[in-house]
């Protein structure tokens, strides 16, 4: 159903925990089990901002991810909400992004090695794969806007890493009907010097709002896979082509279509959708001055002095690459990433819908004595 969470109540819980020097409850840390944010409401009568979406109880998996008991979707986290609210002005100037890319030096060493490989009957790429990986070397992790020590940054990297492993057949998909890109091109190959790039991007059908802009709804899946071919020069430099080959596009479309199913198995992918939702919500609040309209300052949720867990986001990763010799050349690896421009999303996808205000009124009327309710 729809669970409503009071941001005034969340702040009060956080402030009380700090004053008493007590451990913050799981209910607060996991935002009452919210798994997505579908609505943002201003409750002027109670000087509050409400967020609402589907929710349920949670379990901790063996990999330490916290997911819904029935849905398997990861729960939203208070610390990610705090990062989104703290980052919103920076994201206006510089969109949030992460990228895992080969180094030009490693790409050049690999191409030099491949130029000396003689293929013929009985040739098996696995025989030279150790040398190829050594030549390719580690891949570089690049992050913009988001604090590199934050959980949000770690999740963006993890989602990109997981998508790349599925695309490049470094592990089999956990569901049927999602063959890897490497399987798709095994007997076809692709033009020499070109490699695909995939990235995850926010994808909403619309950002709906009431006439007075005090009630909002995020409509749509929230995330999709994008692709583009890159030309790789002999020196290892990469240049975007603005085009994508049909197999890379088919893989991206298939991944997007099956995203919900894959995300139930890999919480890192579900987490990146949570990041999309939280940053779009933070942008709605900032761009339409909902703090001023509601009379609620969210300063406590942006407080730099609140102790936050420190996450070890890597600067480099071991080469994530597969090797297939096709009819038109070698396919080795793919760059990838996550791209999020929440200000552009809110500005370009706004759509007035009178029904959103009616849902807001009903949600606010259900308020009880707790900081969340159904």
Image (cartoon, rainbow, N blue to C red):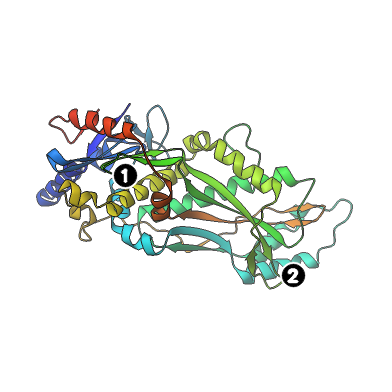
What residue is drawn where x is 31% and y is 44%? 77
Q: Which mark is residue 77?
A: 1
Residue 211 in the image, given as x and y percentages of width and height:
29, 40
Q: Residues within 10 Å of mark 1 (few under 14, many from 20)?
A: many
Question: Which residue is most to the right?
Answer: 121
Specify the quadrant that holds the N terminus.
top left
Check disc 2 and report the residue beneath it. 112
Apparent side of residue 320 relative to residue 119 in the rendered image (left or right): left
Residue 137 visible in the current orientation: yes
Q: Nearer the viewer, mark 2 or mark 1?
A: 1
- Where 327 falls versus 262 (above or below)? below
In percent of width and height, residue 304 lies at: 23, 61
Q: Position of residue 339 (x, y in %)?
A: 48, 55
Q: Badge 2: how crowded within 10 Å, few (<14), some, or many (20+)? A: some
> What is the secondary structure assignment of the residue under circle 1?
loop
Question: Helix, strand or loop at disc 2?
Answer: helix
Q: CA distance from mark 2 to mark 1?
A: 46 Å
Q: Counting residues from the N terminus, which is met first, the one under dot 2 or under dot 1?
A: 1
Which sits in the foreground, 228 or 255? 228
Q: Is residue 84 left or right of residue 176?
A: left
């Amino acid at each position: 159903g729809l669970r409503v969470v009071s941001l005034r109540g969340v702040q009060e819980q956080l402030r009380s925990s700090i004053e008493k020097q007590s451990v913050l409850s799981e209910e607060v840390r996991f935002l009452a089990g919210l798994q997505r944010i579908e609505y943002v409401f201003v409750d002027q009568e109670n000087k509050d901002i409400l967020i609402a979406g589907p929710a349920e109880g949670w379990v901790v998996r063996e990999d330490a991810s916290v997911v819904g008991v029935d849905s398997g979707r990861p729960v939203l986290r208070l610390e990610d909400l705090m990062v989104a609210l703290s980052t919103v002005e920076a994201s206006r100037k510089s969109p949030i992004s992460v990228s895992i890319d080969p180094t030009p030096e490693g790409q050049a060493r690999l191409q030099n090695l491949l130029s000396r490989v003689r293929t013929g009957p009985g040739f098996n790429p696995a025989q030279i794969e150790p040398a190829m990986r050594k030549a390719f070397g580690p891949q570089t992790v690049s992050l913009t806007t988001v604090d590199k020590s934050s959980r949000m940054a770690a999740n963006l990297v993890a989602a990109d890493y997981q998508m790349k492993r599925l695309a490049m057949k470094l592990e089999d998909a956990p569901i049927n009907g999602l063959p890897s890109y490497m399987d798709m091109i095994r007997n076809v190959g692709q033009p020499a010097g070109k490699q695909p790039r995939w990235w995850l991007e926010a994808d909403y059908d619309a950002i709906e709002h009431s006439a007075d802009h005090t009630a909002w709804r995020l409509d749509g899946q929230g995330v999709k896979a994008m692709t583009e071919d890159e030309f790789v020069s002999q020196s290892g430099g990469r240049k975007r082509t603005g085009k994508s080959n049909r197999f890379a596009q088919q893989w991206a479309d298939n991944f997007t279509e099956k995203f919900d199913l894959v995300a139930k198995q890999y919480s890192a992918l579900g987490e990146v959708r949570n990041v999309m939702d939280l940053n779009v919500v933070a942008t709605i609040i900032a761009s339409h001055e909902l703090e001023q309209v509601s009379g609620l300052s969210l300063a406590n949720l942006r407080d730099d002095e609140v102790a936050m867990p420190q996450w070890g986001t890597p600067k480099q990763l071991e080469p994530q690459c597969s090797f297939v010799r096709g009819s038109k050349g070698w396919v080795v690896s793919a760059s990838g990433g996550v791209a999020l421009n929440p200000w552009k999303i809110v500005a370009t996808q706004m759509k007035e819908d009178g029904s959103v205000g009616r849902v807001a009124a009903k949600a606010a009327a259900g308020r009880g004595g707790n900081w969340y309710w159904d």
